[in-house]
Amino acid sequence: MLDLVPAPGAAAWAPPPQGHYPLGHDTALFARPGTEGVARWLRATVGAATGLPLPDGTDNDTERDSGSNRVELRIDPEVGQELGPEGYRLVVDGYLVLIEGGSAAGVFWGAQTLRQLLGPDAFRRAPIDPTRQWSVPMVAIEDKPRFAWRGLMLDVSRHFMPKDGVLRYLDLLAAHKLNVFHFHLTDDQGWRIEIKRHPKLTETGAWRARTKWGHLASDLWTEAPHGGYYTQDDIREIVAYAAERHITVVPEIDIPGHAQAAIAAYPELGNTDVITAASTPLSVWDTWGINPNVLAPTDNTLRFFEGVFEEVLALFPSAFIHIGGDEAPKDQWRQSPAAQARIKEFDLADEEELQSWFIRHFDTWLTERGRRLIGWDEILEGGLAPGAAVSSWRGYAGGIAAAKAGHDVVMCPKQQVYLDYRQDGGPDEPMPIGYVRTLEDVYRFEPVPPELTPEEARHILGTQANVWTEVMENQSRVDYQTFPRLAAFAEVAWADLPAPAERDFAGFEERMRAHYKRLDALGVGYRPPGGPLPWQKRPAPDGNPATLGRPIEGSPPNV
């Protein structure tokens, strides 16, 4: 049995003991043109874990050479035609280890499979047994992803994750064949990216005086400042690190809601004609929920964020730029003479159309610069911006409406793939929030709604899991909430699985026995199958049991 996660499309293997190909200090690595980056990754990771140097091969012959011990990486146009650019073939026989991909990305995903075949110790950073004899099972694997967008969104605004933690998560995405990192960089609780022309965004907006401990209903607080941000060089490093792993980084700059950190730094961005003197100056928000303070729909705000996005575009080469667009209360706009004048100026029906006008402005602005706008499904309200794509988070409805209207969609419904939601209903789960969504629930998630025709379904770019960090104050908590469910999600995003009710969850659980050992080697603090370990359980730092308290709005009875 091949304990691979995600499961490959097709695989055959020879049983042990005869079915193994040895690797040793004489194993040469042949990186054919275009695969040099994959070779660097193999030496830096697999080479470090195994202690094998994997020197460059010296011949230019693409034929098998029975006299050499070799790993060969190759881009093959025929593989691309049959399996797509991210597809690959991995063949291990008596002659060589051969990875052929439709592109360098396909070769890279094949290399990830090779690493899994070597066993969990191949996921360590140094050899734990220098005398070990390494080998790969003899296999023939043909594999390709179901979706082009296989993503994880990480919220670093509610709780900041230092750069090294972000790089670590990029490695974890790559290990699961996920290829999009949605980087949630700004929100009410913190602005996390350096913008040189507007330095107060990080001088003021990156720090809050204190933090609510746990969920919205909690009355517990951490009375210590919290914050941090990434310099532009940090961002360049993160983007380059991701690109070496064939991961696209999609930045999110939230507008017009979830913007109090920006307004705290530059109060003129807010609706100053309705914000009362008692509430100014605003500070970076220290709690969770939907904030009433939104950006003013003024020319000054437009020019300010055009400047922000100019610097963002210079840092992120991704085709898509995420602008948020969610949970923007309209109360201030209803009360604001300036906002009402703007509605009248452009003959808009109401405040919903005013938001649509605001979003369309940046849709046009980004399109003129060769980029595409993507936002949460609220951007459908008041009319969907032409050319915009939708992240469907409030269930399937927004994604269905967008796809039927001919717009591209990334499916990320909160009921299925919000990883801040609890993994179990037991009393020991740390800082409970939202629905119970088990490992099996995630494994049975289906990104393509049955309501779509085949033509409409082509607009489903793919899917992503979302990690909102209100209840995740450090890396350990992020690990616990994210894993092992991200492994189940990765299989949903990669493999062409049967209908949800027909999926072999028992078989997935069996393969996870081996995968937990890989996560152990990587140092991932996942939730064990038997429930949280003593140090992962619910109590807050002061020993308070931190019960859920009042129900969260919109949540089902089991919260």
Image (cartoon, rainbow, N blue to C red):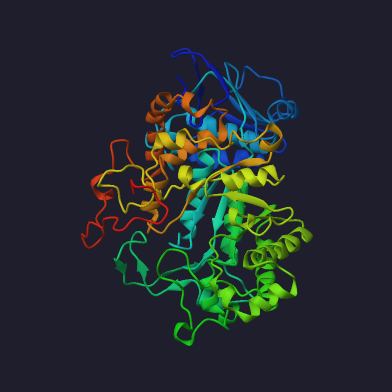
> Residue 191: horizontal and vertical position, in percent?
52, 68
Asked whether the viewer can see residue 321, the reply is yes
> Eyeballing the image, is 174 above or below 270?
above
- Nearer to us in this view, 245 or 136: 245
Q: Which residue extends farthest bottom?
A: 277
Please, is residue 130 above or below residue 342 in the view? Answer: above
Percent x, y of residue 408: 68, 45
195 or 112, which is in the foreground? 195
Q: Residue at x 56, y 50 (%)?
A: 181
Q: Position of residue 432 (x, y in %)?
A: 33, 51
Q: Is residue 194 left or right of residue 454?
A: left
Q: Mark yes or no: residue 56 visible.
A: no
Please, is residue 9 above or below residue 297 in the view?
Answer: above
Q: Nearer the viewer, residue 42 or 453?
A: 453
**Viewer-nearest residue: 534 or 523:** 534
List the single residue furthest toward the left: 543
Above or below residue 463? Residue 283 is: below
Residue at the image point whose x is 40% and y is 56% from the top: 553
Query: Residue most toward the front?
Result: 349
Q: Residue at the location (25% across, 61% down)? A: 541
Identify the residue at horizontal 40%, vertical 37% (top origin). Answer: 439
Residue furthest to the right? 368
- For the N terminus, the quadrant is top left
